[in-house]
Image (spheres, rainbow, N blue to C red):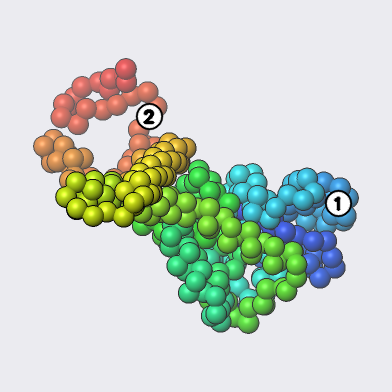
Amino acid sequence: MTTLPRREDIFVSVCFPTFLAGAGAAAKLRALSQRLSERFRYCEILLIVYADAATNYDELMKSSGNLRLLTVRRGTPVYRRRVAAASEAIGDVVAMAAIEEQPALDLLAMIETAHSESSIVIGRRVQQSRVDPALHVLGRSAGFRVNAGDMLTAAYPRTLLNNLLTHPNSQLALRFPPSDAGIPVLWQDAVDAPKPARSLRGLGRRLGIVQKLLISSAPRVLTLVALCALVVTFSGFAFTVYSVIVLLFQETVQQGWFTISLVLSLTAAFLGAAIFGISIGLQKLIEALGSDGGDDIVGERSAVDLFGQVMREFNVDTSAAPHFPSLVARIPSGTFQRPDVEGKEPGHIA
């Protein structure tokens, strides 16, 4: 087995937003800490725990030299803890992890892929869920790439993580990546991935995710409601005009028909106009509150080489640029020699 060289070019942060003290979990954490230290010189592990249970981790803190313990109030939701951990992590690559998923995933490979490919890497279960098509449609309407097989373990490059933290719904964005071409995503298939635990807490967390997706679908729902309200408004006014035409040109009209038709049509038109106004007003508020970082450009290709043009104009050869530092090291400090003038004394650099 070939041992990979220890990397010193990146800082790695591994966060565990839901870590419960226990003999098995502690052993897995120590093993992961050792693997991280052997592969990366600069690394840290962040544990998010409740403030009233922080003393349970004293022994673990003493046995690990790269461990940070962050305490939160009891009852803080899981996805808020993920955001808090991501905000506190200082690594070039930040990994969100769950200790029970580590045997099924190669976390170190995910971190290195995230750094080399500049993309998010998410663990995924091979098994498909029956609710996955419905979640996919709901996620598309909310602007996220939702898959029921996506695991809690993911690796984020710093630049992409900063974009997700500024997202209007950062909690959801850290769980499921937004449908944005500027946020590339890769997946790592899990081997013998553990099934999610069936519990009331887990069910509540999944229902919370569905609720957040429904809330994030508000702009598209409001657009549909505004269109329907506009159709109702025009239909109400059209029926009002029809009622007046019938009254003027029809010899026999049932008594009370015109009055009832007028009341119904004008009421429908008014309600349609009111709902249309409320819908577009709410859309304007959502647009104003949403973050617009100006990240419309997601990539660039260019054939412009201004530096090369300037170098060619001055007839400068840059092919020996890698050896320039060694050349500079041989020049006495504070002096320079003009190559085009022979027999002159060295001048002083201004």
The residue sitting at 32% across, 17% down in the picture is 350
Labels 2, 1: front one: 1
* Cα distance between the residues tagged 2 and 1: 62 Å
The quadrant holding residue 290 is: top left
The residue sitting at 64% across, 64% down in the picture is 206
Q: Amino acid at mark 2?
A: Pro
Q: Which residue is mark 1?
A: 53
> In this image, 292 relative to 320: left or right?
right
The quadrant holding residue 59 is: bottom right
Q: Nearer the viewer, residue 68 or 3?
A: 68
- Badge 2 local density, few (<14 within 10 Å), some, or many (20+)? few
Residue 328's spot in the image, x, y percent?
35, 36
Q: Secondary structure at mark 2?
A: loop
Image quarter hosting the N terminus? bottom right
Tell me if residue 327 comes above or below residue 74 in the rendering.
above
Task: Look at the image and tell me whether residue 73 can be seen.
Answer: yes
Residue 189's spot in the image, x, y percent?
53, 76
Q: Are marks 2 and 1 in contact (CB under 8 Å)?
A: no
Residue 194's spot in the image, x, y percent?
67, 77
The residue sitting at 83% across, 57% down in the picture is 60
- Quick one: label 2 or label 1, which is nearer the N terminus? 1
Q: Secondary structure at mark 1?
A: helix
The residue sitting at 74% across, 64% down in the picture is 201
Task: Look at the image and tell me whether residue 11 can be seen.
Answer: no
> In this image, 55 relative to 50: left or right?
right
Q: Amino acid at mark 1?
A: Ala
- Badge 1 local density, few (<14 within 10 Å), some, or many (20+)? few
Q: Nearer the viewer, residue 243 or 70?
A: 243
> In this image, 62 relative to 91: left or right?
right
Q: Nearer the viewer, residue 320 or 332?
A: 320
Q: Which residue is mark 2?
A: 332
